[in-house]
Amino acid sequence: MEASPSDLTGRARLREAALRLFAQRGFAATSARAVAAEAGLSPALVMHHFGSKEGLRAAVDEQVLARLGAALRELDPGGGDLMGSLGEMSARMFGADPVLRGYLRRALQEDSPASAALFGRLLEGARSELERLIAAEGGRTDADLQWVPFQMLCLIVGPLLLEPVMQPNLDQPMFDAPVLARRSAANQRLLRLGLFGADQSTGAPDTAKPA
Amino acid sequence: MEASPSDLTGRARLREAALRLFAQRGFAATSARAVAAEAGLSPALVMHHFGSKEGLRAAVDEQVLARLGAALRELDPGGGDLMGSLGEMSARMFGADPVLRGYLRRALQEDSPASAALFGRLLEGARSELERLIAAEGGRTDADLQWVPFQMLCLIVGPLLLEPVMQPNLDQPMFDAPVLARRSAANQRLLRLGLFGADQSTGAPDTAKPA
DNA sequence: AGCATGGCTGAACACATGTTCAGTATATTG
DNA sequence: CAATATACTGAACATGTGTTCAGCCATGCT
């Protein structure tokens, strides 16, 4: 997905190195010198290209959000299996790149307006996904429709945020494809049936009971 | 809950100040001088009492984990309403103290073994809670029993971690008592019925809760 | 009384930080 | 070709960092 590091422009190499280190150690704990060293360049070049360390952060943010936004947009026309497209996305994005995971983990923790906006977009995605889910199931629900999108996001994004503390309590890498599929299935199941629903397929199992 | 700051011992004042600042800005972004200033004491005192800044962090961690552990233990004999005791706990702990929320948010993001251990204990709690839930419902389930505890924790801890990005997308303070109760109810409902279960069914009506 | 102990401080240290600046090489343009 | 812009560097600067140290003050012990 990425060009080999050594023939990227200096600017790009600095951005990549910063992404890596910010994801790993956090912004405050990463010095401009460390970024430059990781990129094999001079610290002064950071200032030359980005004006300040904060400028670097902005550039990295922008690039990450661009990648993310692209992946989010790519999702909408998904004519494939209806539900779980959000989970599918999170799999494709987060599963692949542990660096991106780390960076997002840190970004979603800040209270910058940019982070809130990003979450807002995820929320929109969850809401439309929920609508489709409900429509597919017949439109009848007593659930708290305002909170459910948040619950969905907790189920999806939670493991991303909790990866560092979850993984030591597991025996398999939690972002490997099969584990991810299993988790996604469990999420869809929980939403559709709760813990105690019967296993049979999507139709309305219990009744056609008018209210 | 806490003694007035000015008649605490210096050691305790430093710990409290550090807790506050670490929660707010993070460890790396908080200088020992800042902690001392917040406590109205000399930076050298940090070294005198804790040996190093890292020692300070350890002391704060220890104290927080102690508080948390106490609250967790206090939970077990809960003879009240069966399910939702975990949610109840998170309400009592996290809801009350925004500082503790911030600190935990930051702690759960690290990959120190201590954080993983803390999560492990939460996991245990979720597992036993799940057992009780299943037993109460008749013992029949097709759900992925290995993953469900993680899902429960995502639902409970997720909003804690996501507070900074969730809150701007809401119109009410998400850790106020009524909102918390509503969220807890939604969680219990989701677990028991999924999105599409009918409202009546087993157990007591979910919204009833003693003050 | 003397004396030790421990909380506490101000000033200093060595070092790391973000940033600036003068200057070099390389390419692009007129 | 000269001129200019751009990528890039090494050394330096001011400031902030974690930490040390010598010493002050109060308390308590003998």
Image: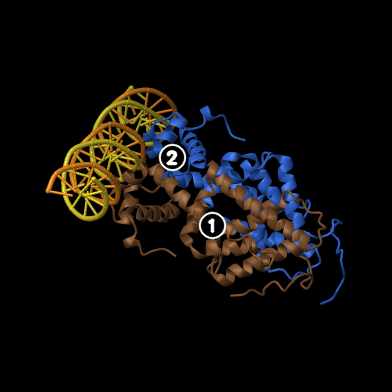
Chain colours: A blue, B brown, C orange, D yellow
Name the element at disc 1. Answer: helix
Q: Quadrant of residue B166?
A: bottom right
Side (left or right) of A200 relative to B127: right
Q: Residue B70: which disc? A: 1
Within the image, what quadrant is residue B196 found in?
bottom right
Q: What percent of the width, then of the height, locates residue A161? A: 58, 49
Which residue was labeled with disc 2? Answer: A30
Q: Nearer the viewer, mark 2 or mark 1?
A: 1
The kind of residue tagged 2 is: Thr
| Residue B44 position in % (x across, y down) | 28, 45
Q: CA distance from mark 2 to mark 1?
A: 36 Å
Q: Are marks 2 and 1 on the same chain?
A: no
Mark 2, other Cα within 10 Å: few <14 / some 14–19 / many ≥20 = some
B11 shown above or below A170 = below
The quadrant the N terminus of chain A occupies is top right
Labelled disc at residue B137? none
Give the structural element (helix, strand or loop) at label 2.
loop
